[in-house]
């Protein structure tokens, strides 16, 4: 908890948040004279590339559009949306015609029995299936109203906005702890040492790992324990300041104490990010999420406010699952 | 207490029998190697002395008149030709291996695999012929460069294959983790997968190197051979140059008894070199990966 309060009152938090995103836009796009209202105006704050502006306006435009919807929909803003999403591996249908909105600044839990397609669904949200040869995807996934599967869209840009934490920890084995955390920045050419140091410390603190590793940031990422490696993976995902974070059972390899810290983190991150978390831990879903999605055999069965879905399930399959009758 | 079906004594005996069988077959496998090494050393030891490493071969008269003669020009030539081959083969083989392992969906991939397998199975002498057509003909002279290219053809398919398997041994999840933090694919391969596979990659280079270093056939009509050390080191690249395997061959078929012992001595040097490479490769593989 101490760590959490520290983060909450972190004075440079918003600066850093913007700095990282700006560092990306500087690196990607030629500087131009358009300003941006993000954060304090440092000299480099002016260097927002045209791409950045466009997405900014895009999301602003969407915000307006969604605001209208929001009037009807209890003030919720749609950040992502899937439309008739179908995913199959060869002949196995893993995700069956799922259409749903993901709300901004909300934690959405994805639950369902093993093999129901949660991981498959989640991976479709940041084009992680691009490298899975036998995965066939149809339908649309929208981020701020734009289809991320549009051939003109670069998956790299999408993945910078939509970060992912995998079920199993995956530190880069040959890199130091420090390099692991800042890999997403350093390896695309961001060299500002001070910025990297700041980002590293902040991300490690958020992932509740800083205290344990602060004296050995130079030792290899593979030298950490399994649970520490998982928190390292979380820190690495946070370091690139994504806008949406996908988490696939992020706490399944963690002890109760680290799990509690990660849950605190998720609740905290909600202020700046939209989070989708796959979990088998139903208590965890109720603790951290605002909305819950129940999937069964690749289909979306029920989707709603977490407390409603858990206290008052509409579908008997949902009821059976949350009461432990199967799965 | 539950009694084992066989008594402890019986089982110990069986273990012993199995073990001695294994030791026996190990000896059987090692015997030819040991015999070769032993024979080469016995035959060539007399020709190994300081002169051997200082002087060039010269004409047969030198050896017959007891004047100092040696194979320094072959040793240096081998170093130059093998090094040339390596700097040609590493980038090409590495590139092909990365392509095979990291871009399995690429249109060119199946063709690359066929070409690589064909090159791998192609007799070494044909690789020499290929280098002859590509380099010797246009240049109008045998050269170390042509020899290097011929040996590169030997190394490339070996490096491509070993690179592919070294990269494939790295869990796929590492790549996904790289992509998930917004790295482009090539950057993921270069900065996360290849460093993790480093030992495997280097081992592959060494094995390819050792394999090519022992080849004589591709060199016969490329680097050709030379009884003398060229006046300038560039002569070793641009003109005919001696190499140990090819020198071993020509000394062995020569009619001079004095030269035969030198041929065996060339064999000792070659063996020592190749064995050192293999042992280094072996030690690297044993090293903890991560
Ligand atoms: N690479 C793949 N190739 C073929 N079939 C796959 C592949 N990955 C998953 N599947 C199949 O797709 C279905 C959905 O799998 P998925 O991993 O999405 O389930 P999940 O809900 O995440 O399960 P769990 O809770 O156990 O992680 C399963 O039937 C699985 O066997
Ligand atoms: Mg899963």
Image (cartoon, rainbow, N blue to C red):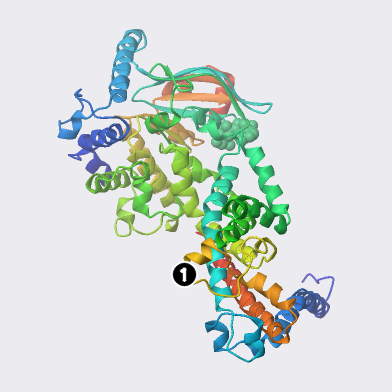
The N terminus of chain B sits in image quarter: bottom right
**Above or below — where is B246 with respect to B199?**
below
**The image quarter in which residue A41 lies:** top left
Q: Quadrant of ligand 1?
A: top right
**Above or below — where is B277 with respect to A26?**
below
Residue lying at the far bottom in this picture: please name it.
B66
**The image quarter in which residue A307 lies:** top left
Q: Residue at x 82, y 78 (%)?
A: B17
Nearer to me, A247 or B190: B190
Specify whether A199 is left or right of A295: left
Nearer to me, A155 or A304: A155
Residue A207 image offset from top left, x and y in percent: 35, 44
Specify whether B266 is left or right of A14: right
**The image quarter in which residue A132 lies:** top right
Residue B23, visible in the rendered structure: no
Nearer to me, B43 or A72: B43
Please name the residue that numbered disc 1 is placed on: B232
Q: Residue at x 69, y 48 (%)?
A: B117
Nearer to me, A100 or A112: A100
Residue at mark 1: chain:
B
């Amino acid at each position: 908890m101490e760590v959490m309060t520290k983060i909450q009152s972190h004075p440079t938090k918003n600066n850093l948040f913007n700095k990282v995103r700006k560092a990306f836009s500087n690196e990607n796009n030629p500087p131009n004279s358009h300003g941006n209202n993000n954060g304090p105006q440092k000299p480099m704050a002016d260097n927002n590339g045209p791409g950045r502006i466009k997405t900014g306006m895009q999301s602003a435009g969407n915000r307006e559009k969604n605001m209208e919807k929001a009037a009807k929909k209890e003030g919720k803003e749609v950040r992502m949306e899937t439309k008739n999403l179908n995913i199959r591996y060869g002949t196995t249908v893993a995700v069956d015609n799922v259409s749903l909105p993901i709300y901004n600044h909300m934690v959405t839990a994805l639950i369902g029995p093993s093999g129901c397609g949660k991981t498959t669904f989640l991976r479709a949200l940041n084009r992680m299936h691009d490298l899975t040869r036998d995965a066939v995807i149809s339908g649309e996934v929208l981020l701020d109203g734009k289809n991320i599967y549009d051939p003109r869209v670069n998956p790299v840009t999408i993945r910078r906005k939509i970060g992912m934490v995998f079920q199993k920890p995956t530190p880069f084995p040959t890199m130091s702890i420090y390099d692991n955390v800042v890999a997403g920045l350093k390896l695309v050419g961001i060299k500002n040492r001070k910025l990297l140091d700041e980002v590293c410390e902040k991300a490690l603190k958020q992932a509740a790992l800083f205290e344990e590793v602060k004296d050995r940031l130079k030792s290899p990422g593979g030298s950490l324990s399994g649970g520490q490696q998982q928190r390292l993976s979380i820190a690495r995902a946070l370091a690139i300041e994504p806008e949406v974070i996908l988490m696939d059972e992020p706490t399944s390899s963690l002890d109760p104490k680290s799990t509690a810290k990660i849950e605190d983190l998720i609740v905290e991150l909600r202020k700046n990010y939209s989070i989708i978390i796959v979990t088998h831990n139903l208590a965890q879903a109720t603790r951290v999420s605002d909305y819950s999605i129940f999937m069964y055999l690749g289909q979306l069965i029920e989707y709603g406010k977490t407390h409603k879905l858990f206290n008052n399930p509409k579908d008997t399959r949902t009821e059976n699952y949350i009461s432990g009758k199967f799965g | 207490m539950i009694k084992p079906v066989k008594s402890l004594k019986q089982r110990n005996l069986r273990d012993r029998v199995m073990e001695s069988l294994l030791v026996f077959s190990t000896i059987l496998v090692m015997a030819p190697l040991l015999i070769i090494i032993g024979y080469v050393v016995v035959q060539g030891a007399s020709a190994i002395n300081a002169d051997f490493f200082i002087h060039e071969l010269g004409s047969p008269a030198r050896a017959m008149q007891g004047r100092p003669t040696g194979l320094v020009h072959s040793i240096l030539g081998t170093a130059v030709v093998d090094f040339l081959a390596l700097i040609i083969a590493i980038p090409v083989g590495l590139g092909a291996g990365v392509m095979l392992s990291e871009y399995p969906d690429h249109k060119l991939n199946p063709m690359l695999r066929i070409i690589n397998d064909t090159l791998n199975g192609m007799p070494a002498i044909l690789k020499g012929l290929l280098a002859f057509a590509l380099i010797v003909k246009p240049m109008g002279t045998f050269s170390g460069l042509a020899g290097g290219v011929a040996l590169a053809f030997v190394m490339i398919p070996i490096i491509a294959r070993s690179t592919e398997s070294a990269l494939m041994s790295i869990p796929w999840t590492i790549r996904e983790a790289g992509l998930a933090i917004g790295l482009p694919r090539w950057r993921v391969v270069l900065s996360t997968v290849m460093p993790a596979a480093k030992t495997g990659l280097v081992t592959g280079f060494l094995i390819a190197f050792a394999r090519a270093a022992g080849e004589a056939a591709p060199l016969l009509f490329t680097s050709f051979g030379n009884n003398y050390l060229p006046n300038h080191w560039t002569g070793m690249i641009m003109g005919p140059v001696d190499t140990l395997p090819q020198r071993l061959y020509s000394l062995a078929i020569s009619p001079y008894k004095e030269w035969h012992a030198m041929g065996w001595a060339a064999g000792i040097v070659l063996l020592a070199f190749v064995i050192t490479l293999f042992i280094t490769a072996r030690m690297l593989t044993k090293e903890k990966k991560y």
